[in-house]
Image (cartoon, rainbow, N blue to C red):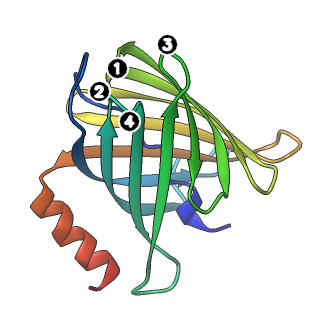
Amino acid sequence: MKWFVFLFLFSCTHALTGKHPAFVEHFTGEVLVYKPKATKPMGKILSIVRRTVDPDAKQIMEEVVQPTKEIGKAKEITTNFTQIDENGKFKVQDHGKTFMGFVQFQGTPWSWEEWTYDIQLKNGSYIKGFGQFESDEMRTEKRMYSKKGKLLYILKERFREVDAATYKIKRKELLNK
């Protein structure tokens, strides 16, 4: 299974109400991948994220860059979030159409404190999970299941916000550009 599928739907935004212009945020972090019942991760994936938040359009676009298994190569994944109700529910789908589903945010609109994932992958497996802000980190935990409901992996993500210059440097390093 390609690791780039594991990091998606990394979402939360900062305080906004009413009419506001779109803004961009940058994050860096890692995804730890566990087998069920394991106490140590079987792998770690560096990830960087650029998120464009547009409250007036009720949309979020995330661009994730992660290394692939091929040394020196990286993959870019773009995911669109479209708000479908005023209670913080968003429909999500990546541009490659490898997954789609829903994210339900909770808390102050556009400054959500926690959220849940309910995602269906193209191959029939699915992901359930949750996320929240904890201190100065964004943390998520996602559980990936087979079509038949068997737990396959547990993914734990940790991210910190960075400035645009740091993001650009890390992106250039990952993409070798």
Number of marks: 4
- Seen in the picture, residue 165 relative to 176 is either above or below; the reply is above
Residue tagged 1: 113
Q: Do the CB atoms of the residues marked 2 and 4 lie less than 8 Å apart?
A: yes
Residue tagged 3: 87
Q: Is residue 44 left or right of residue 99?
A: left
Q: Do the CB atoms of the residues marked 2 and 3 lie less than 8 Å apart?
A: no
- Seen in the picture, residue 111 relative to 155 is either above or below; the reply is above
Q: Quadrant of the N terminus?
A: bottom right
Give SS at disc 4: strand
Give SS at disc 2: strand
Which residue is nearer to you in this view: 10 or 55?
Answer: 55
Mark 1 vs 4, N-terminal side: 1
Residue 139: give its label.
4
Spot occupied by residue 121 in the image (x, y as percentages of width and height): 72, 50
Give SS at disc 1: strand
**How many other residues sit within 10 Å of disc 2, few (<14), some (14-19) or many (≥20)?**
few
Mark 2 vs 1, N-terminal side: 1
Whole-angstrom CA distance, mark 4 to mark 3, is 22 Å
Mark 4 vs 3, N-terminal side: 3
Nearest to the eye among marks 4 and 3: give it: 3
Q: Residue 140 is drawn in which quadrant?
A: top left
Q: Amino acid at mark 3?
A: Asn
Q: Residue 71 is drawn in which quadrant?
A: bottom left
Q: Amino acid at mark 4?
A: Arg
Mark 1 vs 3, N-terminal side: 3
**How many other residues sit within 10 Å of disc 1, few (<14), some (14-19) or many (≥20)?**
some
Q: Do the CB atoms of the residues marked 4 and 3 lie less than 8 Å apart?
A: no
Whole-angstrom CA distance, mark 1 to mark 3, is 13 Å
Give SS at disc 3: loop
Residue 134: give its label.
2
